[in-house]
Structures are given as structure tokens and as C-alpha cells.
Image: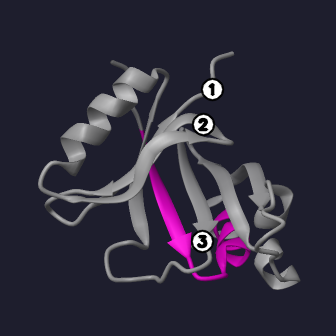
Amino acid sequence: MNIQLNPFILLEGTAKEAVAFYQESLGAQLLFMQTVGEGPQNPDAPLSEEEKAKIAHSVLKVGDAAIFVADLDKGQALRRGNGINICLTVEDAGDARQLYNALREGGEVVAELGPAYFSPAYGMVTDKFGVDFQIFTKRPR
């Protein structure tokens, strides 16, 4: 199994500022950025312009490594320990399920593993040690 580990920084509405800061301070190269408004919208729960402007996901290259930066989802609160988590990226949904099941043992499910518009198998867990993990499966090419 090939696993890619990426730090994932979650912020309360300051992700765009953080990206600019990391570009300046670390020489990070912006590879991808998507706002919440650029993603699919739920017509039954319209978002304000402020909410739409938040960063849903960004990828920065720092040297040979990548870091992810985003704003917390509506309704999520920053708490001690969830400002940075580890995103495990795999190519196979079966591998994602294996990692998800192993990490949730004795821990807590944050988001059930399942299909999302950006991944065929995505989920979040907090392990028994309080470490937050995102499990992300790449889309087949």
C-alpha cells in the first residue's frame, strides 16, 4: 500500500491569509485553491457571501512536501488539537476503508467514510490518542 501523508491546517476564516503568509514566509507555491462558493451548493441551505469566500481546500508545495490549508466548515469549531490533522491519501477505496477502520478503533468518527464530490472514499476520524486524520482516496484517472 502506498500512503502519502500531508499536514492539513484548518483555520477559522483566515485560510486565505495563511496561504499568502506561507507563500511569503516559506516560499510555498500555490498548486490549487478552491473556495466554498466554487464547490457544489445546497439550494436548501444558501450560504452568505462571506461563507462562500472561505477556502474549502488549498494545496501548497513547500520544497518537496505539500501542505493543505482550509477554513473549517460551517458549524465546526476550532478546538485544541484539530487545527492541524494528518491527511492520508491513497489510490484505492479498499485501502481507505482499511485505514479508516484501523484508526477509528477506540477513537471517534468525525465524518463517515463514503463518496464525496471530490473523492470516491473520504472520511475523518479522531484516533484514540486524539489525533485527527482525514482519509482521502484519489479519483481514478
In-front residue for pair 50/120: 120
> What residue does disc 1 label?
139
> Going by the image, does 126 lie left or right of 9?
left
The quadrant in which the N terminus is found is: top left
Kind of residue at disc 2: Ser
Where residue 55 sits in the image (x, y, percent)?
A: 72, 67
> What residue does disc 3 label?
73
* 3D distance between C-alphas at marks 1 and 2: 6 Å
Residue range in magenta is 5-23
Q: Residue at x 67, y 73 (%)?
A: 21
Where residue 114 sits in the image (x, y, percent)?
A: 49, 40
Indicate yes or no whether the magenta region holds residue 12.
yes
Q: Which mark is residue 119?
A: 2
Where residue 16 sits in the image (x, y, percent)?
A: 73, 72
Say if mark 1 contacts mark 2, CB within 8 Å: yes
Indicate yes or no whether the magenta region holds residue 127.
no
* 3D distance between C-alphas at marks 1 and 3: 22 Å
Q: Residue at x 62, y 77 (%)?
A: 74
> Going by the image, does 2 lie left or right of 104?
right
Kind of residue at disc 3: Asp
Q: Considering the numbered disc 1 on the image, is that residue within a helix, a strand or a loop?
A: loop
